Amino acid sequence: LQDEGVTLEDLADTSFNPGDLEMGPEIGQEMVGAFDECEVDLFALAIASAAGADTELESCIVDNVDEDALLDLLARDIGGEETDDEFDEVFAPAEQNCEPGN
């Protein structure tokens, strides 16, 4: 991100999307890998973001989303690839099996 001139202010901006930088798939993989190296569970962060504060929904989503597929999509998205339809596919089982507030 530093090589792309991204600042802390950019990262704090909720509209910031690293995929807009189109850094390429290798950089996307490196960035996803960096979370693991820093002992940050990116999968858990992504699922928590999708579930909001609903812990039961979060647990259901974890059970219904393929971790490897989601992390691969995150890496490709960060790299600048268009992945919206694939995100819908990865989350489809959760959408079918999980309901907020249950």
Image (cartoon, grey):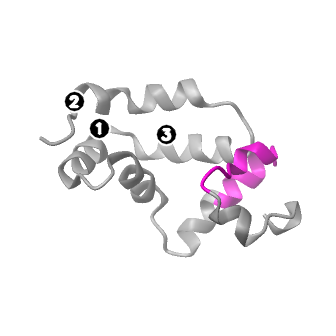
Residue where numbered disc 2 is placed: 97
Vertical placement of residue 55 versus 68, above or below: below
Asked which secondary structure carries label 2, the reply is: helix
Q: Amino acid at mark 1?
A: Asn
Vertical placement of residue 90 versus 21, above or below: above
User: Which stretch did the figure color magenta?
Assistant: 14-31
Q: Are marks 2 and 1 in contact (CB under 8 Å)?
A: yes
Residue where numbered disc 3 is placed: 69
- The image quadrant that residue 31 belongs to is bottom right
Where does the image place residue 102, in percent across and percent down from the top left? Answer: 12, 41
The secondary structure that most of the magenta stretch takes on is helix
Q: Is residue 62 visible?
A: yes
Q: Say which of 47 and 73 sits in front.
A: 47
Residue 29 colored magenta? Answer: yes
The residue mark sitting in front, 2 or 1, is 2
Between disc 2 and disc 3, whose residue precedes?
Answer: 3
Asked which secondary structure carries label 3, the reply is: helix
Q: Is residue 24 visible?
A: no
Asked which secondary structure carries label 1, the reply is: helix
Q: What residue is rendered at 23% in x and 52% in y?
A: 54
Between disc 1 and disc 3, whose residue precedes?
Answer: 1
Q: Is residue 66 left or right of residue 80?
A: left
Residue where numbered disc 1 is placed: 64
Q: Is residue 96 left or right of residue 13?
A: left
